[in-house]
Image (cartoon, rainbow, N blue to C red):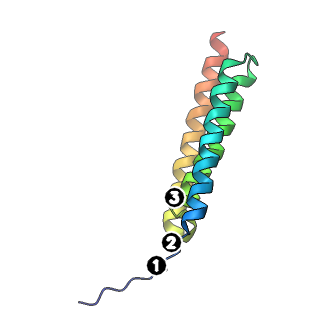
Amino acid sequence: MEKNDNHSQHSHGYGIYILVWLALMALTAITVTVAGINFGNLTVTTALLIASVKTYLVLTIFMHLRSEDRTFRIFVAVSIFFLLVSFVLLFSDYSFLR
């Protein structure tokens, strides 16, 4: 049988991987620094924002999400949506406990 492969190879050079890795390391350092500073309620918000940026970089560069089929991208978007719903429910419950 002939294998019908519709995926086009979108390989990045090593330079882009190194730059993204350095960005991830810098964002991790910023997250650790922010965790040591007391911003009140903004500490968790800032950490989640930085984690979202890191997630975007990993999904688009290392996992090649841009070059995947539309169906796969829809599944990822649905899973991220349910993750956000879980976070909203968690933090709304957490805010009432204080």
Residues under labels 1 and 3: Cα distance? 16 Å
Image-based side of 1 in relation to 27, left or right: left
Give whichever of discs 2 and 3 has the lower sequence position.
3
Mark 2 belongs to which amino acid?
A: Asp
Closer-to-camera residue (49/75)? 49
- The image shows residue 97 at horizontal and vertical percentages of 62, 11
User: Quadrant of the rendered structure where residue 1 is?
Assistant: bottom left
Which label is found at residue 69?
Answer: 2
- The image shows residue 75 at horizontal and vertical percentages of 50, 58
Residues under labels 1 and 2: Cα distance? 8 Å
Q: Give the vertical position of 62 relative to 81 (above or below).
A: below
Which label is found at residue 62?
Answer: 3
Mark 1 surroundings: few (<14), some (14-19) or many (≥20) residues within 10 A:
few
Q: How many marks?
A: 3
Which label is found at residue 37?
Answer: none
Residue at 59 percent across and 38 percent down: it is 85
Residues under labels 2 and 3: Cα distance? 16 Å
Closer-to-camera residue (72/55)? 55
Image-based side of 76 in relation to 44, left or right: left
Residue at 73 percent across and 20 percent down: it is 41
Residue at 31 percent across and 85 percent down: it is 3
Mark 3 belongs to which amino acid?
A: Phe
Closer-to-camera residue (33/49)? 33
Secondary structure under tag 3 reads helix
Secondary structure under tag 1 reads loop
Q: Which residue is mark 1?
A: 7
User: Quadrant of the rendered structure where residue 19 is?
Assistant: bottom right
Dots 2, 3 in contact, CB < 8 A = no
Dots 1, 2 in contact, CB < 8 A = yes
- The image shows residue 95 at horizontal and vertical percentages of 67, 17
User: Quadrant of the rendered structure where residue 86 is?
Assistant: top right
Q: From the image, state whether disc 1 or disc 2 is nearer to you.
A: 1
